Image: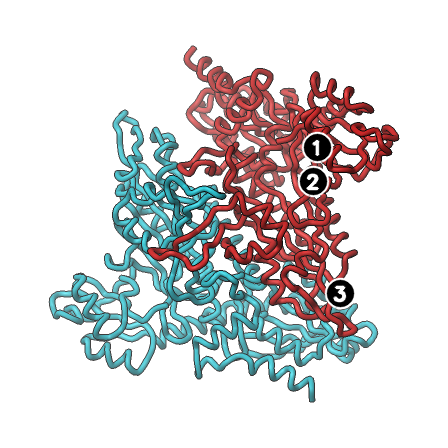
Chain colours: A cyan, B red
Amino acid sequence: MANEKENKKLVEDITSMDVDFAQWYTDVVKKAELCDYSSVKGCMVIQPAGYAIWENIQKELDRRFKETGVENCYMPMFIPESLLQREKDHVEGFAPEVAWVTHGGLEPLQERICVRPTSETLFCDYYQRAIHSYRDLPKCYNQWCSVVRWEKTTRPFLRSREFLWQEGHTAHATAEEAKERTELMLNIYADFCEEVLAIPVIRGQKTKKEQFAGAIATYTIEALMHDGQALQSATSHNFGDGFAHAFNIQYTDKDNKLQYVHQTSWGISTRIIGAIIMVHGDNDGLKLPPNIAPTQVIICPVMQKKAGVLEKADELCEELKKAGIRVKVDARDKNPGYKFADSEMRGIPLRVEIGPRDIENNQAILVRRDTHEKVTVSLSELSEKAAELLKDIQSNMYETAKKHVESHTFTAKTIDEMRSILDEKTGFVKAMWCGCRECEDAIKEKTGATSRCIPFNQEHIADTCINCGKPATKMVYWGRAY
Amino acid sequence: MANEKENKKLVEDITSMDVDFAQWYTDVVKKAELCDYSSVKGCMVIQPAGYAIWENIQKELDRRFKETGVENCYMPMFIPESLLQREKDHVEGFAPEVAWVTHGGLEPLQERICVRPTSETLFCDYYQRAIHSYRDLPKCYNQWCSVVRWEKTTRPFLRSREFLWQEGHTAHATAEEAKERTELMLNIYADFCEEVLAIPVIRGQKTKKEQFAGAIATYTIEALMHDGQALQSATSHNFGDGFAHAFNIQYTDKDNKLQYVHQTSWGISTRIIGAIIMVHGDNDGLKLPPNIAPTQVIICPVMQKKAGVLEKADELCEELKKAGIRVKVDARDKNPGYKFADSEMRGIPLRVEIGPRDIENNQAILVRRDTHEKVTVSLSELSEKAAELLKDIQSNMYETAKKHVESHTFTAKTIDEMRSILDEKTGFVKAMWCGCRECEDAIKEKTGATSRCIPFNQEHIADTCINCGKPATKMVYWGRAY
C-alpha cells in the first residue's frame, strides 16, 4: 500500500499537460532534475541530468561543425561599452538587456564593460587584427560558452538571464561564400534536430522585422511544441560586409587590392532542451530520443535482494555496454513499481525488467518509453533486440512528432480564416504575404501570431497578401511562439 | 635567398630563452598563435591552436573524473554579494579581486552581484537545498567554465582576469570520505600531468599560509619551469564541515540524526598550458608532448607541385589517421624550409618529409621535434614507426623534464646555504621547517622563496628548522614561483 502510494505520488506530482501546459513543463523540469532555480534571480542551475543532455548535444554538433572546417576558440566574456557601440543596429538590439560591470575589485572601472550577450563585436575586433591577406581566409571559428541577457521574465531553459550556447563566427573573402556558410550551418542544425533530437523543423528565413540585429539575412529552424506553440530552435545569420565596414576588417586580395570581408554567425543554445521536453514529453514525464539520451537503457532488477538478481543485472549491463549502449542499473533500495515510474518520468527510452523468475527462464522484459509496449526476450538476444528497439523508438518518436506538426499546420487564405483557425486550434498557419512590415504588424495585431519564417520550400496558397490583398511575394509560416 | 630569409625570420622572432625568458615565453605564445591580447585589459583571446590543447586536456581529465563517479553540471556565473559573504575566510580571500555587476539592462540592481571568482558559495547554496538524507550523498559535481579575478598584472595563460578551468565540488557524509576524495583528485591531476603532459610534479600539502580561503587542507602539485621557477599546477581542497556550518548543509543519517556534510573542491585551469610551454619549449618554439598535441604528426610535402607528391601526402595522411594518429598535411604554398621551421615552432612532435625522390624510393623522412633526429623509413612501415616514435618522444620528454627537476632541486641545512643556492641557481630547495608562520615569513624575506609544498614523500634533511633552529616538524619544498 505504502509503495503503491509512493509510485502514484511520483506521477501525481506532474500536472497534466491538458490542464496546464506551462505547469506540466515546470513539473517535468523539476521532477526529472534537469534544472533548478538559483539564488540569482533568472539564472538557473543545470543539474547533472540536464547537463548530460547538453554534453551529448555538444559532442554531436561539435563533430559536425569540425567536419566542415570549424575550429574552436575562446573570446573574453566582457565587452567594453565603446566596442559594443561600434555597429549601430547591433548595439540598439542588445544594449537594453546587458549586465554592466562597473567595478573591478575595490576600484571603479574607467570604462564600464558588459557581460557578452553575444560576441560579434569581440570576434570582429579580433578578426580586424588577425586578417591581412586572402591567405588568412576563411576564418571559421566557434566557441562554446555562456551569455547573459537581462530578461524581465524567465523560464527554465526557454528564457533565462544566463544560458549556454555555441556561437560560430566566420569571415570570408566573398559574399557568395558567406551565404553558403550561413546555409550550410542552418542545414547542420536542421539535420541534427531531425536525426538526433527527433524534432522535425521548418527551415526558412526570418522576415526583416524578426532578423538579428546587424544581419542582412537570418535563417532559422522552427519547431512546433506539443501545445501548438512554435520555438525558434537555432539561427544562422549572414552579415554581408556590414560589420566589416563598422570594424574595418579588410584583406588584400590576389590582385593586391583591399577588400572587406563577408561574415556570418550562427548559434544554438540550451533552449533546445526545452524543445526536447515540449515536443516529446507526456503526462508520465520526460521522453528522451535514444540518440540524445544520456542513459538509453535502464535495468531494473525485480526482487533484487534474492541471490543472483543484482549480479545478473550487472552482467547484462556490461553486455549492453559492450554493444555500445549507454546503460545503467537502478540498484536503489526502492520497490520495482517506483523504479518503473521513475525511469519513465526521467524519460529513459528503454527499460529492462529482470527478476528471479525471468532469470530462471533465461529471459527479460523490455518496456518502451514511447509506446509502453512490453516484449519478452531471451537473454541471448538482449543486446541485439535492445539496439533494434532503440532504433525503432528513435524513428517512431520522429514520426509521431512529424504527424503532430502536420496535424497542427493549417492554411489560410483570408485574415478571418486565419483568426478563426487560431481561435480554435493551435499550430502553424501557412499564409501569403506581400512582404511589407505594416502587414506583418497588422497580422500580429489581428491574430496574435508572429511570422515564424519564410520557408525555403515555398508553396502557392493564394495570389494575394492575407492582410492587404495586394500581390503576395512570399508564403510565410505564422504562429504563436515561445 | 628570399626563402632562406623567411625561414630565418620565423625563428629570429623568438627571443632566446637564455637572454630573456619572459620575452621568450611571450614570443612563443604569440608566434605559435596560442593566445592573443583582447580589447579588455587583462583578458585573453584563446586562439584555435591554444584552445585545441585545452580541449584535449578537457577530454582526458573529464574521462578520468567520470570514472570516479563525478557528474558535470552548470552553476550560474553570478554570485549575489550576500551569498559571497556567507563564509568569512572565503569572502576575505576573494572580495578584493572580483568584478561587480551593478546594472542589469537600464536599471540598477537592488543587490550587486559579482562574476564568480570560484563557485564554492553557489554549490553550497545548491547543496543546502538538494541534500536532505544520507541517501543524497555523496554529491560529486564538476563544472567546466570560466572565472574572473581582477588581477593587477597579467600574463597570457599564467595570470589573466578571466581564465578557463574546471572546478569540482563534492559533499560527503564523513570527514574521512572528504579526505579521500581530496587525495584522489590530487592524484588524478598528478597522474594526468605526468602521463599526458610529460610534466613531473611534486605532490604535497600547502602550508596554512598558502592554503585556500576557507579550507582546512589544500593539496597541490608543483612543477618546475625551465627557468627554475615553480608553478602551482592544480589544487585540491578539503573544507571539512566549515562551509556546511556557514551554509547549514545538513543531512539525516541512518539513525535519523542531523549531521553536517564534509566538502571538497578541486581545480585545474588554462594556466597549465603555460606550464606545458615553459617545461618543454626551447629556442625553436613550442614543444608539445604527443599525448596532448592536437596535431601529432605533420606531413610536409617537398616540391609539392610535382605530379603525385600532394596525392601521396594525402594518402599517407589517411593511413596515419586510420592508425589513430592526429595528423595533418601542410599543403600551403610555402617552401619546405619554412614549413619545417614552422612545424617546429608550433611544437608538432613528429614531421614527415616526403618529396619526389622519396616517393621513387618508396620512403619518407621522419624528424623528431624533441631531439631533431632524422630517420628514413620505408612507406610500408610508416604508421608503425610513427606510432613508435610518438611513444618514445612522450617518454623522452618526460625523462628530460624529470632530469631538469632533479638537477634543479637542492637541499639546504642552514638559511645561509639556502640563500647562497638561490643567489646562484634557480630551482627547488628542500629544507626543514618548524611549522610556524613566523619562520615561513622570515624565510621568504631572507631568500625570496615561498613554501611550495610539504611533500607527501617526506625526507629527513636535518633535525632543526632552517630559520629558528627549533625542532623541525616538516621537510618543505621552497622556491620562487609564478
Q: Is residue A214 left or right of residue B473?
A: left
Residue B368 in picture, x, y percent from top left: 63, 24
Q: Nearer the viewer, residue B235 or B333?
A: B235
User: Residue B441 — which label?
Assistant: 1
- Residue shown at 53%/42% (left/top)? B163
Of the pair A452 and B207, the residue shown nearer to us: B207
* Mark 1 or 2, closer to the camera: 1
Q: Which residue is mark 3?
A: A315
Please tell me whether mark 3 or mark 1 is closer to you in this view.
Answer: 1
- Mark 2 belongs to which amino acid? Lys
Residue B295's image quarter? Answer: top right
Find the distance from the CA under tag 1 to the CA under tag 2.
9 Å
Density class for disc 2 (Cα within 10 Å; few <14, some 14-19, many ≥20) is few
> Could you tell me the amino acid type at mark 3?
Glu
Dot 1 or dot 2: first in sequence order is: 2
Mark 2 secondary-structure assignment: helix
Q: Secondary structure at mark 1?
A: helix
The residue wearing badge 2 is B209
Mark 2 belongs to chain: B
> Helix, strand, or loop for circle 3?
helix
- What is the three-letter code of the residue carrying label 1? Asp
Q: Quadrant of residue A211?
A: bottom left
- Give the answer, above or below, for where A268 lies relative to B217: below
Check the image and name the residue furthest to the bottom: A1
